[in-house]
Image (cartoon, grey):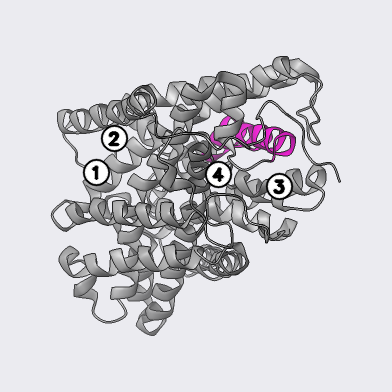
Amino acid sequence: MTDAPRAEGPRLISTFTLAMMCAAIVVGIEGLPDMASYGLAGITIYAFFGLFYFIPVGLVSAELGAGWPRDGGVYNWVKLALGSPVAMVALWCQWTQIVVWYPTVLAVAAEAILYLFNPDLATNPKIALPLIIGTFWFATLINLPGLRISGIIITSCFWIGTLLPVVLLVVMAVWWLMDGQEPMTSMEPRALLPRIDSIGALVLAMLAFSFLSGLEANSVHFRRVRNPSRAIPMALFIAVIIVLLMSTAGSISISIFVKPSELEMAAGPLQVFRIFTDHYGMHWLLPALAIAVFLGMFGHMVVWIIGPTESLRVASDDGLVPPLFRRVNKRGVPSALLIMQAILVTVLCLPFAFLDMNMAFVIITAVSAQIYLVMYALMFITAIVLRYKYPDAKRPYRIPCGKAGIWLVAGIGFIITTGGIFLLCIPPDSEALSIPAATYMWLVIPATLVMLLVPILIYKFKPDSWTPIPDQLPIEEPGGDEQ
Protein backbone atom coordinates (compact mmCIF):
# COMPACT_ATOMS: atom_id res chain seq x y z
CA MET A 1 0.00 0.00 0.00
CA THR A 2 1.09 3.59 -0.62
CA ASP A 3 0.13 7.09 0.45
CA ALA A 4 -0.31 8.92 -2.85
CA PRO A 5 -2.74 8.66 -5.77
CA ARG A 6 -2.01 5.64 -7.95
CA ALA A 7 -0.98 5.79 -11.58
CA GLU A 8 -3.54 3.14 -12.44
CA GLY A 9 -6.29 5.40 -11.16
CA PRO A 10 -9.98 4.73 -10.63
CA ARG A 11 -12.05 3.29 -13.45
CA LEU A 12 -14.85 5.28 -15.06
CA ILE A 13 -18.40 4.22 -14.28
CA SER A 14 -21.49 4.60 -16.44
CA THR A 15 -24.42 6.92 -15.78
CA PHE A 16 -26.62 3.85 -15.24
CA THR A 17 -24.24 2.39 -12.66
CA LEU A 18 -24.07 5.73 -10.82
CA ALA A 19 -27.87 5.97 -10.83
CA MET A 20 -28.21 2.46 -9.44
CA MET A 21 -25.58 3.19 -6.79
CA CYS A 22 -27.40 6.38 -5.78
CA ALA A 23 -30.73 4.54 -5.57
CA ALA A 24 -29.21 1.58 -3.73
CA ILE A 25 -27.55 3.80 -1.15
CA VAL A 26 -30.92 5.36 -0.23
CA VAL A 27 -33.48 2.58 -0.65
CA GLY A 28 -33.34 0.01 2.11
CA ILE A 29 -36.29 -2.32 2.49
CA GLU A 30 -35.54 -2.57 6.22
CA GLY A 31 -37.31 0.80 6.69
CA LEU A 32 -40.54 -0.11 4.85
CA PRO A 33 -42.30 -1.75 7.87
CA ASP A 34 -41.62 1.39 9.90
CA MET A 35 -43.36 3.69 7.41
CA ALA A 36 -46.09 1.09 6.81
CA SER A 37 -47.47 1.87 10.26
CA TYR A 38 -48.81 5.12 8.74
CA GLY A 39 -50.96 3.36 6.14
CA LEU A 40 -52.13 5.51 3.23
CA ALA A 41 -50.79 8.55 5.05
CA GLY A 42 -47.35 7.25 4.06
CA ILE A 43 -48.08 8.61 0.56
CA THR A 44 -48.48 12.12 1.98
CA ILE A 45 -45.43 11.77 4.21
CA TYR A 46 -43.20 10.61 1.36
CA ALA A 47 -44.59 13.34 -0.90
CA PHE A 48 -43.81 15.99 1.73
CA PHE A 49 -40.31 14.79 2.49
CA GLY A 50 -39.66 14.14 -1.19
CA LEU A 51 -40.61 17.67 -2.18
CA PHE A 52 -39.09 19.63 0.70
CA TYR A 53 -36.14 17.44 1.67
CA PHE A 54 -35.16 14.66 -0.72
CA ILE A 55 -35.39 16.66 -3.96
CA PRO A 56 -33.45 19.63 -2.46
CA VAL A 57 -30.75 17.18 -1.38
CA GLY A 58 -30.59 15.85 -4.94
CA LEU A 59 -30.49 19.30 -6.55
CA VAL A 60 -27.82 20.63 -4.19
CA SER A 61 -25.77 17.44 -4.55
CA ALA A 62 -25.96 17.74 -8.33
CA GLU A 63 -24.74 21.36 -8.33
CA LEU A 64 -21.95 20.82 -5.81
CA GLY A 65 -20.95 17.42 -7.18
CA ALA A 66 -20.79 18.62 -10.80
CA GLY A 67 -19.03 21.85 -9.84
CA TRP A 68 -16.50 20.27 -7.46
CA PRO A 69 -16.30 16.58 -8.44
CA ARG A 70 -13.02 15.93 -6.63
CA ASP A 71 -12.61 13.15 -4.08
CA GLY A 72 -13.97 14.04 -0.67
CA GLY A 73 -17.56 14.97 -1.57
CA VAL A 74 -19.33 16.81 1.25
CA TYR A 75 -16.09 17.23 3.16
CA ASN A 76 -14.48 19.22 0.32
CA TRP A 77 -17.62 21.27 -0.34
CA VAL A 78 -18.02 22.35 3.28
CA LYS A 79 -14.29 22.99 3.65
CA LEU A 80 -14.32 25.29 0.65
CA ALA A 81 -17.31 27.25 1.98
CA LEU A 82 -17.02 27.16 5.78
CA GLY A 83 -13.48 26.04 6.60
CA SER A 84 -11.74 22.90 7.85
CA PRO A 85 -13.23 22.72 11.40
CA VAL A 86 -16.81 22.77 10.11
CA ALA A 87 -15.88 20.36 7.30
CA MET A 88 -14.54 17.96 9.91
CA VAL A 89 -17.91 18.04 11.71
CA ALA A 90 -19.78 17.41 8.45
CA LEU A 91 -17.53 14.50 7.53
CA TRP A 92 -17.76 13.00 11.00
CA CYS A 93 -21.57 13.19 10.93
CA GLN A 94 -21.71 11.51 7.54
CA TRP A 95 -19.43 8.67 8.60
CA THR A 96 -20.62 8.01 12.16
CA GLN A 97 -24.31 7.98 11.28
CA ILE A 98 -23.78 5.05 8.96
CA VAL A 99 -21.45 3.26 11.36
CA VAL A 100 -24.09 3.27 14.12
CA TRP A 101 -26.71 2.20 11.55
CA TYR A 102 -24.84 -0.87 10.30
CA PRO A 103 -25.85 -3.18 13.19
CA THR A 104 -29.57 -2.69 12.49
CA VAL A 105 -29.39 -3.58 8.80
CA LEU A 106 -27.03 -6.44 9.61
CA ALA A 107 -29.59 -7.83 12.06
CA VAL A 108 -32.26 -7.81 9.34
CA ALA A 109 -29.88 -9.51 6.90
CA ALA A 110 -28.93 -12.18 9.45
CA GLU A 111 -32.55 -12.96 10.26
CA ALA A 112 -33.28 -13.45 6.57
CA ILE A 113 -30.47 -15.93 5.95
CA LEU A 114 -30.95 -17.85 9.23
CA TYR A 115 -34.59 -18.42 8.40
CA LEU A 116 -33.46 -20.67 5.56
CA PHE A 117 -32.15 -23.17 8.10
CA ASN A 118 -34.43 -22.77 11.09
CA PRO A 119 -36.96 -20.00 11.83
CA ASP A 120 -36.14 -20.23 15.53
CA LEU A 121 -32.50 -19.40 14.87
CA ALA A 122 -33.48 -16.09 13.27
CA THR A 123 -34.79 -14.73 16.57
CA ASN A 124 -31.79 -15.83 18.63
CA PRO A 125 -29.36 -12.88 18.67
CA LYS A 126 -26.48 -14.91 20.13
CA ILE A 127 -26.64 -17.29 17.18
CA ALA A 128 -27.18 -14.47 14.69
CA LEU A 129 -24.23 -12.43 15.98
CA PRO A 130 -21.45 -14.40 14.21
CA LEU A 131 -23.37 -14.16 10.93
CA ILE A 132 -23.92 -10.42 11.44
CA ILE A 133 -20.22 -9.80 11.94
CA GLY A 134 -19.15 -12.18 9.16
CA THR A 135 -21.52 -10.53 6.67
CA PHE A 136 -20.05 -7.09 7.30
CA TRP A 137 -16.48 -8.33 6.94
CA PHE A 138 -17.40 -10.03 3.67
CA ALA A 139 -19.00 -6.80 2.40
CA THR A 140 -15.83 -4.94 3.39
CA LEU A 141 -13.57 -7.37 1.52
CA ILE A 142 -15.70 -7.01 -1.63
CA ASN A 143 -14.94 -3.28 -1.68
CA LEU A 144 -11.16 -3.75 -1.56
CA PRO A 145 -10.70 -4.54 -5.31
CA GLY A 146 -12.49 -1.29 -6.24
CA LEU A 147 -15.72 -0.25 -7.96
CA ARG A 148 -15.42 -2.59 -10.95
CA ILE A 149 -16.47 -5.56 -8.82
CA SER A 150 -18.47 -3.83 -6.09
CA GLY A 151 -20.44 -1.80 -8.69
CA ILE A 152 -21.61 -5.02 -10.38
CA ILE A 153 -22.56 -6.53 -7.01
CA ILE A 154 -24.40 -3.39 -5.92
CA THR A 155 -26.43 -3.21 -9.13
CA SER A 156 -27.27 -6.94 -9.05
CA CYS A 157 -28.26 -6.89 -5.38
CA PHE A 158 -30.40 -3.81 -5.96
CA TRP A 159 -32.41 -5.50 -8.72
CA ILE A 160 -32.71 -8.88 -7.00
CA GLY A 161 -32.81 -7.87 -3.35
CA THR A 162 -34.58 -4.50 -3.35
CA LEU A 163 -36.55 -3.88 -6.54
CA LEU A 164 -37.86 -7.46 -6.82
CA PRO A 165 -39.09 -7.66 -3.16
CA VAL A 166 -40.86 -4.30 -3.51
CA VAL A 167 -42.58 -5.49 -6.70
CA LEU A 168 -43.61 -8.69 -4.89
CA LEU A 169 -44.99 -6.65 -1.98
CA VAL A 170 -47.16 -4.70 -4.44
CA VAL A 171 -48.32 -7.94 -6.11
CA MET A 172 -49.15 -9.45 -2.70
CA ALA A 173 -51.14 -6.38 -1.68
CA VAL A 174 -53.16 -6.47 -4.91
CA TRP A 175 -53.69 -10.22 -4.50
CA TRP A 176 -54.88 -9.69 -0.92
CA LEU A 177 -57.48 -7.12 -1.99
CA MET A 178 -58.66 -9.02 -5.07
CA ASP A 179 -59.10 -12.12 -2.94
CA GLY A 180 -61.65 -10.25 -0.87
CA GLN A 181 -59.48 -9.93 2.21
CA GLU A 182 -60.04 -6.97 4.49
CA PRO A 183 -57.25 -4.38 4.27
CA MET A 184 -55.47 -3.84 7.57
CA THR A 185 -55.44 -0.07 7.03
CA SER A 186 -58.14 2.39 6.12
CA MET A 187 -58.51 2.89 2.37
CA GLU A 188 -60.70 5.99 2.64
CA PRO A 189 -59.41 9.27 1.16
CA ARG A 190 -59.22 10.83 4.63
CA ALA A 191 -56.61 8.20 5.56
CA LEU A 192 -54.17 10.13 3.36
CA LEU A 193 -53.91 12.72 6.14
CA PRO A 194 -51.11 11.78 8.57
CA ARG A 195 -51.96 11.39 12.22
CA ILE A 196 -50.33 14.34 13.92
CA ASP A 197 -52.60 14.52 16.96
CA SER A 198 -49.53 14.34 19.17
CA ILE A 199 -45.89 15.36 19.00
CA GLY A 200 -44.92 11.67 19.23
CA ALA A 201 -46.96 10.87 16.12
CA LEU A 202 -45.23 13.69 14.26
CA VAL A 203 -41.84 12.42 15.40
CA LEU A 204 -42.56 8.97 13.96
CA ALA A 205 -42.97 10.62 10.57
CA MET A 206 -39.59 12.30 11.08
CA LEU A 207 -37.95 8.87 10.88
CA ALA A 208 -38.53 9.20 7.14
CA PHE A 209 -35.41 11.39 7.21
CA SER A 210 -33.35 8.27 7.87
CA PHE A 211 -34.98 6.36 5.01
CA LEU A 212 -34.54 9.16 2.45
CA SER A 213 -30.94 10.05 3.17
CA GLY A 214 -27.64 9.30 1.49
CA LEU A 215 -28.09 10.64 -2.03
CA GLU A 216 -24.96 12.78 -1.69
CA ALA A 217 -22.76 9.98 -0.33
CA ASN A 218 -21.88 8.77 -3.83
CA SER A 219 -20.55 12.22 -4.69
CA VAL A 220 -17.08 10.75 -4.11
CA HIS A 221 -17.67 8.92 -7.41
CA PHE A 222 -18.99 11.89 -9.41
CA ARG A 223 -15.64 12.58 -11.04
CA ARG A 224 -15.55 8.99 -12.32
CA VAL A 225 -18.25 9.48 -14.97
CA ARG A 226 -17.89 10.80 -18.49
CA ASN A 227 -19.54 14.14 -19.26
CA PRO A 228 -20.51 15.02 -15.66
CA SER A 229 -22.65 17.97 -16.78
CA ARG A 230 -25.15 15.47 -18.16
CA ALA A 231 -24.38 12.25 -16.29
CA ILE A 232 -24.57 13.55 -12.69
CA PRO A 233 -27.98 15.31 -12.88
CA MET A 234 -29.40 12.44 -14.96
CA ALA A 235 -28.19 9.80 -12.49
CA LEU A 236 -29.58 11.73 -9.53
CA PHE A 237 -32.92 12.34 -11.28
CA ILE A 238 -33.31 8.63 -12.04
CA ALA A 239 -32.37 7.75 -8.46
CA VAL A 240 -34.90 10.22 -6.95
CA ILE A 241 -37.76 8.77 -9.04
CA ILE A 242 -36.82 5.17 -8.21
CA VAL A 243 -36.44 5.87 -4.48
CA LEU A 244 -39.75 7.70 -4.06
CA LEU A 245 -41.74 5.15 -6.10
CA MET A 246 -40.24 2.13 -4.35
CA SER A 247 -40.48 3.57 -0.85
CA THR A 248 -44.11 4.63 -1.25
CA ALA A 249 -45.29 1.47 -3.03
CA GLY A 250 -43.50 -0.85 -0.62
CA SER A 251 -44.71 0.74 2.61
CA ILE A 252 -48.33 1.09 1.42
CA SER A 253 -48.39 -2.54 0.27
CA ILE A 254 -47.22 -3.74 3.67
CA SER A 255 -49.90 -1.73 5.47
CA ILE A 256 -52.62 -3.43 3.42
CA PHE A 257 -52.07 -6.93 4.83
CA VAL A 258 -50.19 -6.38 8.11
CA LYS A 259 -51.64 -4.72 11.21
CA PRO A 260 -49.50 -1.88 12.60
CA SER A 261 -49.50 -3.53 16.03
CA GLU A 262 -47.95 -6.68 14.54
CA LEU A 263 -45.05 -4.96 12.82
CA GLU A 264 -41.58 -5.70 14.16
CA MET A 265 -39.23 -2.92 13.12
CA ALA A 266 -36.10 -5.00 13.59
CA ALA A 267 -37.47 -7.99 11.69
CA GLY A 268 -37.68 -6.13 8.41
CA PRO A 269 -39.67 -7.26 5.36
CA LEU A 270 -39.16 -10.98 5.98
CA GLN A 271 -41.78 -10.86 8.73
CA VAL A 272 -44.19 -9.34 6.21
CA PHE A 273 -43.50 -12.04 3.63
CA ARG A 274 -43.95 -14.70 6.33
CA ILE A 275 -47.41 -13.39 7.22
CA PHE A 276 -48.55 -13.51 3.59
CA THR A 277 -47.09 -16.94 2.79
CA ASP A 278 -48.50 -18.43 6.01
CA HIS A 279 -51.96 -17.12 5.15
CA TYR A 280 -51.92 -18.68 1.68
CA GLY A 281 -49.90 -21.81 2.51
CA MET A 282 -47.01 -20.76 0.26
CA HIS A 283 -44.20 -21.72 2.64
CA TRP A 284 -42.12 -23.01 -0.27
CA LEU A 285 -41.67 -19.40 -1.48
CA LEU A 286 -40.20 -18.07 1.76
CA PRO A 287 -36.61 -19.38 1.35
CA ALA A 288 -36.28 -17.59 -2.01
CA LEU A 289 -37.69 -14.42 -0.45
CA ALA A 290 -35.24 -14.72 2.44
CA ILE A 291 -32.34 -14.89 0.01
CA ALA A 292 -33.67 -11.84 -1.85
CA VAL A 293 -34.02 -9.85 1.39
CA PHE A 294 -30.50 -10.81 2.41
CA LEU A 295 -29.09 -9.72 -0.95
CA GLY A 296 -30.95 -6.42 -0.70
CA MET A 297 -29.47 -5.69 2.72
CA PHE A 298 -26.05 -6.87 1.59
CA GLY A 299 -26.02 -4.62 -1.46
CA HIS A 300 -27.21 -1.72 0.68
CA MET A 301 -24.20 -2.21 2.94
CA VAL A 302 -21.67 -2.64 0.14
CA VAL A 303 -22.60 0.70 -1.44
CA TRP A 304 -22.37 2.51 1.90
CA ILE A 305 -19.08 1.04 3.04
CA ILE A 306 -16.81 2.85 0.59
CA GLY A 307 -18.44 6.33 0.26
CA PRO A 308 -17.88 8.03 3.65
CA THR A 309 -14.55 6.26 4.17
CA GLU A 310 -13.26 7.75 0.92
CA SER A 311 -14.00 11.21 2.36
CA LEU A 312 -12.11 10.29 5.53
CA ARG A 313 -9.15 9.36 3.35
CA VAL A 314 -9.20 12.86 1.80
CA ALA A 315 -9.38 14.42 5.29
CA SER A 316 -6.31 12.38 6.20
CA ASP A 317 -4.51 13.89 3.21
CA ASP A 318 -5.33 17.28 4.76
CA GLY A 319 -3.91 16.22 8.13
CA LEU A 320 -7.23 16.19 10.02
CA VAL A 321 -7.26 12.46 10.85
CA PRO A 322 -4.42 9.95 11.37
CA PRO A 323 -2.03 9.49 8.39
CA LEU A 324 -2.73 5.76 8.47
CA PHE A 325 -6.16 6.48 6.97
CA ARG A 326 -4.66 7.88 3.76
CA ARG A 327 -3.14 4.54 2.81
CA VAL A 328 -4.73 3.03 -0.29
CA ASN A 329 -4.14 -0.14 -2.27
CA LYS A 330 -3.27 -0.35 -5.98
CA ARG A 331 -6.93 0.20 -6.89
CA GLY A 332 -7.03 3.49 -4.97
CA VAL A 333 -9.24 2.01 -2.21
CA PRO A 334 -8.59 3.21 1.40
CA SER A 335 -8.04 -0.33 2.66
CA ALA A 336 -6.69 0.59 6.10
CA LEU A 337 -9.80 2.69 6.75
CA LEU A 338 -12.12 -0.10 5.62
CA ILE A 339 -10.46 -2.58 7.97
CA MET A 340 -10.60 -0.11 10.86
CA GLN A 341 -14.29 0.51 10.14
CA ALA A 342 -15.00 -3.22 10.10
CA ILE A 343 -13.34 -3.60 13.52
CA LEU A 344 -15.42 -0.73 14.93
CA VAL A 345 -18.68 -2.13 13.55
CA THR A 346 -17.79 -5.53 15.05
CA VAL A 347 -17.53 -3.92 18.48
CA LEU A 348 -20.81 -2.02 18.01
CA CYS A 349 -22.61 -5.23 17.04
CA LEU A 350 -21.72 -7.05 20.26
CA PRO A 351 -24.38 -5.38 22.48
CA PHE A 352 -27.10 -6.53 20.06
CA ALA A 353 -26.90 -9.97 21.67
CA PHE A 354 -28.45 -8.47 24.81
CA LEU A 355 -30.80 -5.69 23.63
CA ASP A 356 -34.48 -5.52 22.76
CA MET A 357 -34.23 -5.29 18.97
CA ASN A 358 -37.31 -3.12 18.39
CA MET A 359 -36.16 -0.50 20.90
CA ALA A 360 -32.58 -0.63 19.63
CA PHE A 361 -33.77 -0.21 16.04
CA VAL A 362 -35.78 2.95 16.79
CA ILE A 363 -33.17 4.57 19.05
CA ILE A 364 -30.32 3.92 16.64
CA THR A 365 -32.43 5.15 13.73
CA ALA A 366 -33.21 8.37 15.61
CA VAL A 367 -29.58 9.02 16.59
CA SER A 368 -28.42 8.23 13.07
CA ALA A 369 -31.01 10.58 11.58
CA GLN A 370 -30.13 13.45 13.92
CA ILE A 371 -26.42 13.19 13.19
CA TYR A 372 -27.04 13.03 9.47
CA LEU A 373 -29.40 16.02 9.54
CA VAL A 374 -26.61 18.13 11.05
CA MET A 375 -24.49 17.29 8.01
CA TYR A 376 -27.34 18.14 5.65
CA ALA A 377 -27.90 21.50 7.36
CA LEU A 378 -24.22 22.29 6.76
CA MET A 379 -24.46 21.12 3.15
CA PHE A 380 -27.42 23.42 2.43
CA ILE A 381 -25.56 26.37 3.97
CA THR A 382 -22.53 25.45 1.87
CA ALA A 383 -24.50 25.57 -1.39
CA ILE A 384 -25.64 29.12 -0.63
CA VAL A 385 -22.20 30.32 0.51
CA LEU A 386 -20.44 28.95 -2.58
CA ARG A 387 -22.85 30.80 -4.89
CA TYR A 388 -21.56 34.05 -3.35
CA LYS A 389 -17.97 32.99 -2.70
CA TYR A 390 -17.37 31.57 -6.19
CA PRO A 391 -20.11 33.03 -8.40
CA ASP A 392 -18.15 32.43 -11.61
CA ALA A 393 -16.97 28.89 -10.86
CA LYS A 394 -17.79 26.30 -13.52
CA ARG A 395 -20.96 24.48 -12.56
CA PRO A 396 -21.94 22.00 -15.29
CA TYR A 397 -25.26 21.79 -13.44
CA ARG A 398 -26.70 24.82 -11.64
CA ILE A 399 -29.98 25.10 -9.70
CA PRO A 400 -32.16 27.39 -11.87
CA CYS A 401 -33.29 30.97 -11.14
CA GLY A 402 -29.95 32.28 -9.93
CA LYS A 403 -29.47 33.25 -6.29
CA ALA A 404 -33.22 33.21 -5.66
CA GLY A 405 -33.30 29.57 -6.76
CA ILE A 406 -30.46 28.47 -4.50
CA TRP A 407 -31.95 30.34 -1.53
CA LEU A 408 -35.34 28.71 -2.13
CA VAL A 409 -34.09 25.15 -2.58
CA ALA A 410 -31.30 25.15 0.01
CA GLY A 411 -33.31 27.36 2.40
CA ILE A 412 -36.27 24.99 2.46
CA GLY A 413 -33.92 22.05 2.93
CA PHE A 414 -32.19 23.82 5.83
CA ILE A 415 -35.46 24.64 7.61
CA ILE A 416 -36.76 21.08 7.29
CA THR A 417 -33.50 19.50 8.49
CA THR A 418 -33.06 21.76 11.52
CA GLY A 419 -36.68 21.20 12.51
CA GLY A 420 -36.13 17.45 12.25
CA ILE A 421 -33.07 17.59 14.51
CA PHE A 422 -35.12 19.02 17.38
CA LEU A 423 -38.24 16.91 16.82
CA LEU A 424 -36.25 13.67 16.87
CA CYS A 425 -35.36 14.37 20.50
CA ILE A 426 -38.96 13.40 21.36
CA PRO A 427 -40.04 9.72 21.54
CA PRO A 428 -42.13 8.53 18.56
CA ASP A 429 -45.68 7.34 19.08
CA SER A 430 -46.54 4.04 17.38
CA GLU A 431 -48.63 0.93 18.08
CA ALA A 432 -45.59 -1.20 17.29
CA LEU A 433 -43.37 0.57 19.84
CA SER A 434 -43.38 0.94 23.57
CA ILE A 435 -40.46 3.07 24.70
CA PRO A 436 -40.55 5.07 27.94
CA ALA A 437 -40.07 8.75 27.15
CA ALA A 438 -37.32 9.18 29.73
CA THR A 439 -35.40 6.15 28.44
CA TYR A 440 -35.62 7.38 24.85
CA MET A 441 -34.50 10.93 25.63
CA TRP A 442 -31.68 9.88 27.97
CA LEU A 443 -30.29 7.64 25.24
CA VAL A 444 -30.87 9.72 22.10
CA ILE A 445 -29.95 13.26 23.22
CA PRO A 446 -26.64 12.47 25.01
CA ALA A 447 -25.58 10.08 22.24
CA THR A 448 -26.17 12.76 19.60
CA LEU A 449 -24.35 15.46 21.59
CA VAL A 450 -21.34 13.19 22.19
CA MET A 451 -21.19 12.33 18.51
CA LEU A 452 -21.09 16.04 17.62
CA LEU A 453 -18.49 16.87 20.26
CA VAL A 454 -15.96 14.25 19.16
CA PRO A 455 -14.91 15.86 15.81
CA ILE A 456 -14.47 19.24 17.52
CA LEU A 457 -12.14 17.68 20.10
CA ILE A 458 -10.24 15.75 17.41
CA TYR A 459 -9.66 18.93 15.42
CA LYS A 460 -8.64 20.96 18.48
CA PHE A 461 -6.20 18.43 19.94
CA LYS A 462 -4.90 16.68 16.80
CA PRO A 463 -1.14 16.01 17.15
CA ASP A 464 1.47 17.72 15.00
CA SER A 465 2.35 14.34 13.48
CA TRP A 466 -0.87 14.50 11.44
CA THR A 467 0.75 16.47 8.67
CA PRO A 468 -1.00 17.15 5.35
CA ILE A 469 0.42 15.90 2.09
CA PRO A 470 2.27 18.98 0.73
CA ASP A 471 1.61 18.37 -2.95
CA GLN A 472 -2.19 18.28 -2.64
CA LEU A 473 -4.00 20.56 -5.08
CA PRO A 474 -5.49 23.57 -3.25
CA ILE A 475 -9.18 23.11 -2.67
CA GLU A 476 -9.73 26.74 -3.63
CA GLU A 477 -9.51 25.73 -7.29
CA PRO A 478 -13.19 25.28 -8.10
CA GLY A 479 -14.76 24.03 -11.27
CA GLY A 480 -15.87 20.72 -12.73
CA ASP A 481 -14.94 18.79 -15.82
CA GLU A 482 -17.27 19.71 -18.64
CA GLN A 483 -15.86 17.29 -21.16
Which circle's residue, 3 or 2, is located before the other in the chain?
3
Cα distance between the residues tagged 2 and 4: 30 Å
Which residue is at 41% across, 69% downward? Answer: 294
Which circle's residue, 1 or 4, is located before the other in the chain?
4
Q: Residues within 10 Å of mark 3 (few under 14, many from 20)?
A: many
Which circle's residue, 3 or 1, is located before the other in the chain?
3
- Which mark, by number, is residue 217? 4
Q: Which residue is mark 3?
A: 223
Nearest the viewer among 230 and 116 is 230
Residue 264 seen in render: no
Circles 1 and 2: CB atoms closer than 8 Å: yes
Which residues are drawn in magenta? 46-69
User: Does residue 28 lie above or below 141 as drawn?
Assistant: above
- Which mark, by number, is residue 42? none
Cα distance between the residues tagged 1 and 2: 7 Å
Which circle's residue, 2 or 4, is located before the other in the chain?
4
Cα distance between the residues tagged 3 and 2: 43 Å
Q: Between label 1 and label 4, give the one nearer the viewer.
A: 4
Q: Which residue is mark 1?
A: 433
Amino acid carrying label 1: it is Leu
56 is within the stretch colored magenta: yes
- Which mark, by number, is residue 429? 2
Amino acid carrying label 2: it is Asp
Which residue is at 79% across, 32% downward? Answer: 395
Cα distance between the residues tagged 3 and 1: 43 Å
Which residue is at 58% across, 67% downward? Answer: 159
Considering every residue shown, the one lying at the far bottom of the view is 284
Amino acid carrying label 3: it is Arg
Q: Residues within 10 Å of mark 2 (few under 14, many from 20)?
A: some
Q: Residues within 10 Å of mark 4 (few under 14, many from 20)?
A: many
Q: Where residue 192 sits in the image (x, y, percent)?
A: 50, 38
